[in-house]
């Protein structure tokens, strides 16, 4: 998409990514005029502060947001308050792995519900940031906002996002639009 918008339609193309897995050394960094790994994984609002628009050419922005990624934290939240789940950090966990063993349970239904609610709150927050984004962008700006994956919250007994090819992991948040 940035190749077509840049080389055929004359757009200035920009990418702002929150997750290091999408760093400038990956194939996704192609035909962007600017490509920046943000200093924090959970601060879409800071992306808006860094956006610039050219009066002569329309703009395209790819924005990869991390607020919906575990630990589902907002930028102003004290990291010491983030949930800590041993062994999660990007790897899926089968919720009944410890069943029938002497190992303690991974976590209980209340913890799962709390994590799900944290992600819902992150989405509510992002909804407000999206409103600001579309108010900020001038006409003829093409915008894509996405995360790098979805999350499992107990579906088929799993929590997390990978390495598992589950439909829910492939259902990440995605918003695109051309500002009228």
Image (tube, rainbow, N blue to C red):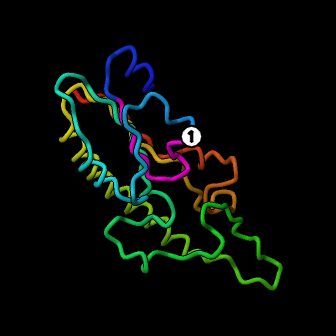
Residue at left 16%, top 26%?
55
Residue at left 38%, top 21%?
5
Locate the C terminus and report the quarter of the image it occupies: top left
Neighbours of disc 1 within 10 Å: few (<14), some (14-19), many (20+): few
Q: Toward which corner of the image does residue 140 lie, by quadrant?
A: top left
> Does the magenta portion include 43?
no
Q: Would you name the residue on which mark 1 appears?
A: 26
Q: Is residue 27 above or below residue 94?
A: above
29 horizontally vs 50: left or right: right
Q: Toward which corner of the image does residue 118 lie, by quadrant?
A: bottom left
The answer to whether residue 175 shows anywhere in this view is no
Q: Is residue 48 above or below residue 90?
A: above
Residue placed farthest to the top in the image? Answer: 8
Residue 132 pos. (x, y %): 21, 47
118 horizontally vs 98: left or right: left
Number of callouts? 1
Residue 9 pos. (x, y %): 34, 16
> Does the magenta portion include 22?
yes
Residue stretch rendered in magenta on the structure: 13-25
Residue at left 60%, top 49%?
169
At mark 1, the secondary structure is: loop
Q: Is residue 149 above or below residue 53?
A: below
Q: Nearer the viewer, residue 5 or 86?
A: 5
Q: Nearer the viewer, residue 139 or 61?
A: 61
Residue 72 pos. (x, y %): 45, 64
The answer to whether residue 39 shows anywhere in this view is yes
Residue at left 44%, top 55%?
66
């Amino acid at each position: 998409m940035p190749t077509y918008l840049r080389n055929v339609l004359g757009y200035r193309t920009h990418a702002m990514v929150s997750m290091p897995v999408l760093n400038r050394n990956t194939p996704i960094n192609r035909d962007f005029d600017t490509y920046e790994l943000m200093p924090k994984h959970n601060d879409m609002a800071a992306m808006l502060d860094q956006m610039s628009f050219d009066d002569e050419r329309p703009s395209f922005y790819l924005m990869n947001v991390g607020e919906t990624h575990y630990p589902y934290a907002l930028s102003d939240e004290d990291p010491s308050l983030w949930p800590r789940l041993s062994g999660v950090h990007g790897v899926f966990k089968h919720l009944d792995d410890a069943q029938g063993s002497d190992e303690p349970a991974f976590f209980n239904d209340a913890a799962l519900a709390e994590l799900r609610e944290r992600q819902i709150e992150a989405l509510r927050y992002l909804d407000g940031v999206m409103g600001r984004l579309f108010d900020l962008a001038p006409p003829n700006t093409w915008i894509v906002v996405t995360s790098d994956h979805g999350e499992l919250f107990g579906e088929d007994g799993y929590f997390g996002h990978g390495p598992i090819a589950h439909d829910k992991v492939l259902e990440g948040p995605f918003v695109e639009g051309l500002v009228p």
